[in-house]
Amino acid sequence: MTWKSKFIAVLLILALCTPAFAIGQDKVGHFAVGSAIGWVGTTAENGFWTSVTVSTLKEAFDATGHGTPEWADFGAGVLGALLTYLIRTQFTPDRD
């Protein structure tokens, strides 16, 4: 998958997340960032685990007094990573 395809896919994911204010802008942000990070890895698995790691570190940072750690934020990031993983493994011609 070329960098252009990845860029377009990330933009589409972000655009689809924009109207989802019913679940809270914060969760949408975590979902979008988790999904975007999922495209960074050289393989779908690498991207997924990178995103999960970043979500974990972000909530750990919040737990040290720099924010409010929430399982829902972590879950939203992981769901974004999962969406990207599924797109990369199931819906792209050059599967990892």
Image (cartoon, grey):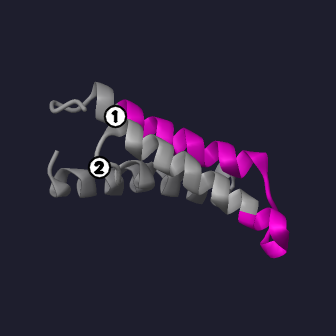
Q: Secondary structure at mark 1?
A: helix
Dominant SS in magenta: helix
Q: Amino acid at mark 2?
A: Ala
Instruction: Name the residue nearer the viewer: 45 or 3.
Output: 45
- For disc 2, the marked residue is 9
Pointers 2 and 1 in contact (CB under 8 A)? yes
In the figure, 88 relative to 80: above or below?
A: above
Instruction: Name the residue nearer the viewer: 83 or 40.
Output: 40
Q: Is residue 9 visible?
A: yes
- For disc 1, the marked residue is 87
Question: What's the residue at 65%, 58% (across, down)?
Answer: 57
Q: Secondary structure at mark 2?
A: helix
The residues colored magenta run 61-86
Return the x and y of residue 36 as percentages of the image width and height: 41, 55
Return the x and y of residue 2 as percentages of the image width and height: 14, 51
Q: Whole-Å distance between the Cαs marked 2 and 1?
A: 9 Å
